[in-house]
Amino acid sequence: MGSPAVHANAKVTRQDWLNAAREVLISDGVGEVKIMALGQRLGVSRSSFYWYFESRQDLLDALLDAWEVRNTAQLRERCARPAATITGAVCSFFECFIDPDLFDPGLDFAIREWARRDGGLRARVDAADAARLEALAAMFARYQYDPAEADIRARILYFQQLGYHALDQREP
C-alpha cells in the first residue's frame, strides 16, 4: 500500500489520481476532492486508490508537495539562473508564468483558497510566498540593488504577477 510503483494490472497510475484531484481542487475546492468521486471520474474502483495512497490526507499532502515543486521550486530555480543583466534575470522569472509546466496559477489560487480555512496550510502558503520573495530579492541583490530596494522590487514584481493571474487575464 502507498507504493509509488506502477502496478501491472492497474488501469490508472498514481499521477492519474493526482491529476484528477488537482483538477477537482481547482474547479470545485478541497471539499470536493473525494476518493469515490475521483474513482468514478477515472473509471476505476476506489480500492485502486489505496495502491498509491494511504488515505485522502495522503493524497492532499501529495498535491501540496507537487504544488511546492511545480510552483515554488521552479520559480526559485529560475530566479537563481545566471543572466548578463537584471532584465535577463527578470525574463527568467517570467518564464514560470509563460510555461504552465513551470507554474500553475490555477493550482496556486486553489491552494490559497483552501488555506483561508486551514491555519496549518496557511502557514505553508506563507512560507512558500516568503521563499519566492526571498529568491526574487536575491536575484535583484545579485545586480547590486541594496537589500531594501531588492526587497521592494521583489514584492512589486511578485505581487503584480499574482494579481495578473488573479484577474484571470487571457492574453496570447
Image: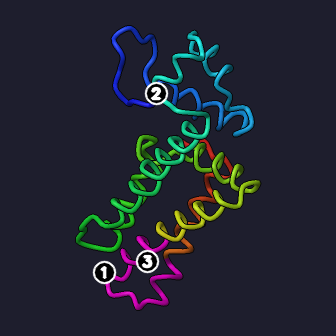
The quarter of the picture where residue 2 lies is top left
- Amino acid type for the residue under numbered disc 2: Tyr
Residue 144 left/right relative to 106: left
Q: Position of residue 154 (x, y in %)?
A: 49, 75
Few, some or many residues within 10 Å of mark 3 (<14, 14–19, 20+): many
Residue 144 lies in the magenta stretch: yes
Residue 19 lies in the magenta stretch: no
* Residue at 33 percent of width and 60 percent of height: 77
Q: Is residue 54 above or below residue 89?
A: above
Q: For the residues marked 1 and 3, what is the alpha-carbon distance in whole angstroms?
A: 9 Å
| Residue of label 2 | 52
Q: For the residues marked 2 and 1, what is the alpha-carbon distance in whole angstroms?
A: 43 Å
Q: Position of residue 141 (x, y in %)?
A: 36, 83
Give the residue at the far front of this rendering: 1
Query: Which circle's residue, 2 or 1, is located before the other in the chain?
Result: 2
The quarter of the picture where residue 21 lies is top right
Query: Along the line of sight, which residue is nearer the eye, 90 or 135?
Result: 135
Q: Which residues are magenta?
A: 133-153
Q: Secondary structure at mark 1?
A: loop
Of the residues tagged 2 and 1, which is closer to the observer?
A: 2
Q: Secondary structure at mark 3?
A: helix
**Residue 93 visible:** yes
Number of the label disc, if any, that sits on residue 137: 3
| Residue of label 1 | 142
* Residue at 43 percent of width and 71 percent of height: 136
